[in-house]
Image (cartoon, rainbow, N blue to C red):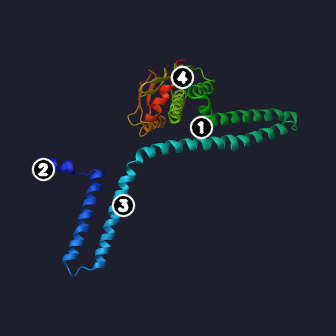
Amino acid sequence: MHVSTRYSRLWPLSTKNSRWLTAVLCIGSIAGNIALYLTSSEFPVSLLLLNLAALASILHSQLRTDHSIKFQPQELADRMLEVQETERHRLSRELHDDIGQMLTAAKMQCEWLQRRLPEELCTYSIQLTNTLDETLEKVRDLSAILNPRQLASLGLEASLRAHLLRTLADSQVHWSLECHQRLAGIPEEMSIAAFRITQEAVTNMLRHAHAKNLLVRLQRLPEGLTLLVTDDGLGFDPAPNPGQQGQRGMAGMAERVALLGGTWSVHSEPGRGTQINVLFPWAPRAHERAHTNKKPT
């Protein structure tokens, strides 16, 4: 039992210990090759140089790997957020500029035909024009969802209010957005994450929850920005691993929170609604700026 416990602590080696072991073995092998060359007249110098070059290459590779990994997690997190938002902006531009312009052109052609069609066909032409109008409006809404242009100019609170007005306009949901402090000075990545999480929560509510009431609350605290999204819908059983259980929307929320070093919780039961709580901690650089801009409304 004592032997197995001792070896269980040494094996498997961690990545850091493995790199150190490789470095020690390389240095030891280099010293051994030099010692063998000095003590043996039959050891060719070409073989010594080849061995030294190979070992030096291995050692250099290990040192470079050690240096690059130090900054990898945060760089990957920042890059992932950047790529996601860049792709959303690209899709938004394509929808608004390309598809939107094509639908507008089709609508103009349909109106041109409508003025020249026989009276018995005008009804169908009007229906087609109305369908194109509805499609164009949907494309514009989707473009705005993918790229909330007002987020940078209007701020988080106003952008969320505009999104809720647009998204819930045709629903029977009674909603409320509460924000008791000014949100000036909130870092851009935090505003985007809060907006996207609320966006996904509202979409899930409309698709699955059939709720009658929705509350979204933003609050500035000393430890960070909090976001609460709660509804009185059908509820569900939250999965421990949303991505593996097919809850892609919840998995996306968890990913955004994790990338900013935040915490979150989901409280829901079938028939008892859903409550999502998120805390985004202040980054060291943004902490002072966020508190400087903290003023009561």
* Mark 1 residue crowding within 10 angstroms, few (<14) / some (14–19) / many (20+): some
Tell me if I can see residue 18 in this picture. Answer: yes
* Mark 4 residue crowding within 10 angstroms, few (<14) / some (14–19) / many (20+): some
Residue with the mark numbered 2: 3
Residue with the mark numbered 4: 182
Q: From the image, state whether disc 3 or disc 1 is nearer to you.
A: 3
> What separation in Å lies between label 3 and label 1 (alpha carbons)?
42 Å
The residue type indicated by label 3 comes to Ser
> For the image shown, how many numbered marks are present on the structure?
4
Q: Nearer the viewer, residue 218 or 35?
A: 35
Residue with the mark numbered 1: 146
Rendering quarter of residue 264? top left
Q: Residue at x 24, y 67 (%)?
A: 29
The residue type indicated by label 4 comes to Arg
Residue with the mark numbered 3: 61
Tell me if I can see residue 1 in this picture. Answer: no
- Asked whether disc 4 touches disc 2, contact meaning CB atoms under 8 Å apart, the reply is no
Helix, strand or loop at label 3? It is helix
> What separation in Å lies between label 2 and label 1 (alpha carbons)?
59 Å
How far across and down, in percent of the image, does residue 293 sit?
52, 25
The residue type indicated by label 1 comes to Leu
Q: Nearer the viewer, residue 117 or 286?
A: 286
> What separation in Å lies between label 4 and label 3 (alpha carbons)?
51 Å
